[in-house]
Amino acid sequence: MLTKTTLLAARQCARRAWLLLRDPARATPPPAGQVALRDAGRAVGRLAHGLFPGAVLVEEHDFAAARTRTATLVAEPRVPTILEAAVEHDGVGVRVDALERLADDAFGLREVKSGTRVRDTHLDDLAIQHWVLTGAGFRIASVELVLVDPDYVRGDGTPEWTRFFQRRDVTGEVVKRSAAVATHAQALRTALAETEAPAIEPSPHCSMPYRCEFWEHCTAPLPPDWILHFGRVHPEQWAALRAAGTTRLAQLGEADEVSPVLHRARQALARGRAVVTPELAAALADFGPPAEYLDFETVNAAVPLFPATQPYQRIPFQWSLHRLDAAGGLAHFDFLAAGGGDPRRAFAETLLARTGGRREPIIVYSDFESDVLAEVAENFPDLASDLEEVRGRLRDLLPIMRAHVYHPGFRGSFSLKSVAPALVPGFGYGDLAGIHDGAEATVQLARLLAGECDAATAAAIREDLRAYCARDTEALVRLHAALRALLAA
């Protein structure tokens, strides 16, 4: 039996759908942070159950048993809404978030998403469900997408779920798209009948709308200088490069209209070492040392954690600061919220106590810290002037790296976790015991703030958070030193 997951995968790539069903072991396991974010999205879906008073949940995991239970509930007119209804038509099975009983023996199809706006993938998802339901004999009078309302502001008590969620009618667009589902299902069956995966070459479609879990498997046979190893290329531009036989960095000519990054990557790969532009020295002129190196961690939960905050609002809870003096001495300072309340004011005040009144540049990586400081300044007007002074000292290394530096070890990524280990041999994040990326840090902090951990677990998470954030600012220190060494060489 096909599912909406495999049908949606086939819309992106028939090869991806074939591998999902026939050879799933080829997939790259998702990182822990991504899994945690997916689980958080499912938790939002469960919260939406409160929108349907009297609803009955189909708890059976086995699809055949769930389908039987669904049929029983459909036949019971006193059940107003069936949650996780299981329905099959023409070899395609779906689980419907909410099947709401309406007047005149009609039903409403409701799909819950943890996002804040309608996306094409949501409509395609609903189109598959609509096709299955109508094919199975249901009369669907309306289709709604249940989303998080980004304008909702939490009050002092429990969140008001009828205000937290927004219900968007998408009936017309879904009905229009559902007409093509039968064709897509047949095309997928034809592909699955083959003994080998469809011979579809990797291209920009592999990341549209999401990065395919088989990317590493499908690109493993390609040469090390294959262009898409080194960054995204617009589909039309990729088609033109491929038509010209230019799919490798070595085949690029100076006149080829690709990003300057790819030209630098070609030079770096050919030389086997870092390439820098002549303008790098001027770009780093006001970065020190002496200098400070700053990194923040935030939590942006779907359900606001504190009064007067909104869904997905960034709540800063941790900072790390390394200070490098003119003589080369290095000191480290940090802050991690104690939990139990809104941490923003303590976050700001402790940061100002360490940075206020100083003049050294504060080196960051991206405009994230600047944006967070601006938001905190807006929340606390009495601290705004001092926070703006700190913002004025920020110096961002990320655009410097993109515009002036490339190393073969970057592999197309300018993330701090790619560039620092490439330019600083032996440096990395692999030895950290618990948390290895920002997504993991956000999820673990949300657990602390929600009081989901016992004392021992909470203490361990706090140590992991401090170690991870400190490693990020250490990475900035080491990266800055590596850039100065490149200039000296």
Image (cartoon, grey):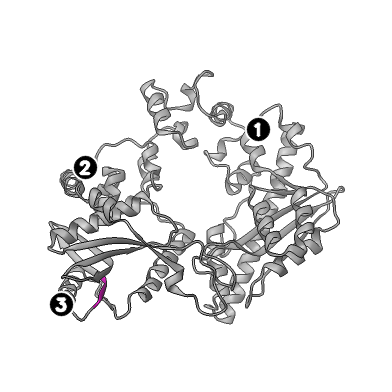
Q: Describe residue 292's horizontal placement relative to residue 121 as left or right.
A: right
Q: What predominant SS class does the magenta segment belong to?
A: strand
Where 155 falls versus 224 (above or below)? below
- Counting from the top left corner in percent of width and height, residue 414 is at 58, 42
Tell me the magenta residue range. 80-84
Q: Relative to residue 57, is residue 268 drawn left or right?
A: right
Q: Nearer the viewer, mark 2 or mark 3?
A: 3
**What label sits on residue 196 in the rendered view?**
2
Residue 409 against residue 387 in the figure, above or below: above
Q: Amino acid at mark 1?
A: His
Q: Secondary structure at mark 2?
A: loop
Say which mark, if any, is on residue 72: 3
Cβ–Cβ under 8 Å for marks 2 and 3 = no
Residue under label 1: 404
Say what secondary structure mark 1 lies in.
Answer: helix
Q: Amino acid at mark 2?
A: Glu
